[in-house]
Image (tube, grey):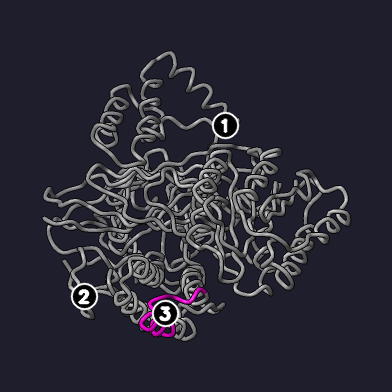
Amino acid sequence: MDTPQDLYQALGVPPAATPDDIRFAYRALARRLHPDVNQNPGAAAQFRDIAAAHNLLNDPVERQKYDMSRRRIGDNNYFSMRVTTGQRSLMALDEQQVFYLLVELMPERTRSLQQMDSRLNLTLVLDHSTSMRGQRLDRVKAAAHQIIEHLNPEDVFSVVSFSDAAEVIIKAAPLANKPEAKARIMIMQASGGTEIYQGLLAGVTENRRNASRRHVNHIILLTDGRTFADEPQTLELADKAAKEGISISAMGIGDEWNDSFLDEIASRTGGTSEYISSPLGVARFLNDRVRSLGQSYAERVTFSIAPDPDLKIESAFRLMPTPQPLSADADPIPLGTLQNGSAVSVLYQIQVAPQTTLGVRSLVRVEATGDVLREQRLGVKVIQDLSTEIKGGPINDEPPFPILDALNKLTLYRLQEKAESAITRGDHEEATRHLRQLETRLMAAGQPELAAAAGAEAQRVSNTRAFSGEGQKALKYGTRLLLASRILTGNLSEGKEKQP
Amino acid sequence: MKICPNCQTKNREGILFCDECGQPLKDTPSLATREFKRSDAPPQIKVENWGTARISDKSQIIIHVRDVAEPVVVPSSDRMVLGRLDLINGSKPDFDLTPFGAQDKGVSRVHAAFQRSDETLSLIDLGSVNGTHLNGQLLAPNQPRILRDGDEIRLGKLILNIYFM
């Protein structure tokens, strides 16, 4: 059953609030979030919530009923959400400015101590096109075997293989006979082309059979090729899966696959996209993924940000559990799994219109939701409202370490992105310039190997006006991985990240 | 507007790394390169360079209760509960505010906590009756916020400032 939202929390008033307090709080929020004044994607849904909360609490009879049920439900602390801005106050300024917002969601500290395996509903969607022949397919089979070995009796598992058409190799069910399942995987043969839509459709169909909000519903798509013409269809399917509570991770082997397409599938569903440069890495990537799913504290985590009308989200980037670029226009943003003893965190860049009035003002309302698996509490929501002071003089606040550290690394990823988009536009001079800058910054960051790769690509782009597939992916996923290279967020519950 | 010292690009106020070339802009504190490397050893800390939001496990916290002459210096621990000592109910906070008139000012027995992690110090309201304010804003219970040197905290009606040392 869905855990009902705390209506008092939604309006930001204490449970003892008078009818006037409630009316006042509602009006203040409506002035910020009403669709007539606020076009931000997050504002509309959040406004509906506060309007519903106000309607109910405004009715004395309904409120009394609600208060009684609220007492029965009791303690609703499942998440600890920390919102942090880069600076304590903003400067009064007659031009646009920018601030950073870090949102971190963690298990509530007293609840995250017990470790328990979460129940998986896992589907592997494996590419067996001709290009997978040999070592690639062999490694994939070996990795699938390892996954089967580690599944718990109550986990639901299915496997789909695809090339031009898809075939269900293992039907979705708890695995009764592991050796038989392994044998079914062994007989996969490499042949045919790559049609990702066919494979993913069969995978979603299998996963859907057992998809429930008590499970970790996850699909891992593994491919080495490019799909043609069916990309829009595939993305639609991904959106549908996300709505049904299924997340999709996409892993590309080698250099032929379409990275922005796989990124998009993962971002839209709360999954992760990864680059596996050598077949030798397949087992590690797959096992890491499955292991992290097995330690889920909460699933289907989403963040929704409603900035005030004069603010606009420019970009969003997930830092944890795995670094992933996100769409700034999506709301709510699906973020996938919150692991026990870990965090889900997103860094936002937000633009502020010119500010002339001094004093305290509201900035953003932040909501996070998730299904807490072990406690069987679904749709748990936490809300924070953030305000700041507009000051006259220059602001010299140092950004908190987690923000500074993340930005420092994100800057590298963005440079790579800029080079790529310049090439797409046909501006190879700009691309070369960005790659040279990336080389410099990577050297300064103590990453000589990636710096050398950036230098080599700069040379190549200025000569041939194109990236090498290998270099482009190495840079993209290499700079992205830097964001995971240190514990970035404050893990309040444990102090240190647990190694699985 | 900030001009990048490296490529002269104009960046909007608030941007910390140049949009064009990635150069840290003026006033952006630099991070040592070693922090990129995965390491079990904590990064080396240069206390004198620290700015407003950083705190190490060696740092101390200075708590200055308003209208009290002497500030109190406490070592920063991983978690420190602020409240009122009450032996009858068995409440024993790590930092007892009773000497500062906590009872009259509406401080709960278990009011709020400081938590330290990854070089930051967070303030968390622990479901107090009269609420916790940070720089004038009421905090939602159990939802941490990062503290900065000089922040003003209000527990019920008890106002205190916090400094890092």
Magenta stretch? A455-469
Q: Earlier in the sequence, mark 2 or mark 3?
A: 2
Residue B24 vertical placement versus A239 (above, below): below
* Residue A195 point in image, percent of width and height: 61, 54
Residue A55 seen from this side: yes
Q: Are marks 2 and 1 in contact (CB under 8 Å)?
A: no
- The chain ID associated with circle 1 is A
Q: Is residue A462 left or right of residue A278?
A: left
Residue A15, x across and y down, in percent:
41, 29
Q: Residues within 10 Å of mark 2 (few under 14, many from 20)?
A: many
Residue B45 is tagged as 3
Amino acid marked by disc 3: Ile
Q: CA distance from mark 1 to mark 3?
A: 46 Å
- Does residue A304 belong to the magenta stretch? no
The disc placed on residue B66 is none
Q: Which residue is mark 2?
A: B4
Q: Amino acid at mark 2?
A: Cys
Dot 3 falls on a residue whose secondary structure is loop
Q: Quadrant of residue A40?
A: top left
Q: Which residue is tagged 1? A: A2
Distance in Å between CA atoms under marks 2 and 3? 28 Å
Specify few, some or many for label 3: CA neighbours under 10 Å numbering under 14, 14-19, or 20 or more: some
Of residues B69 and A296, the one drawn nearer to the viewer in this rendering: A296
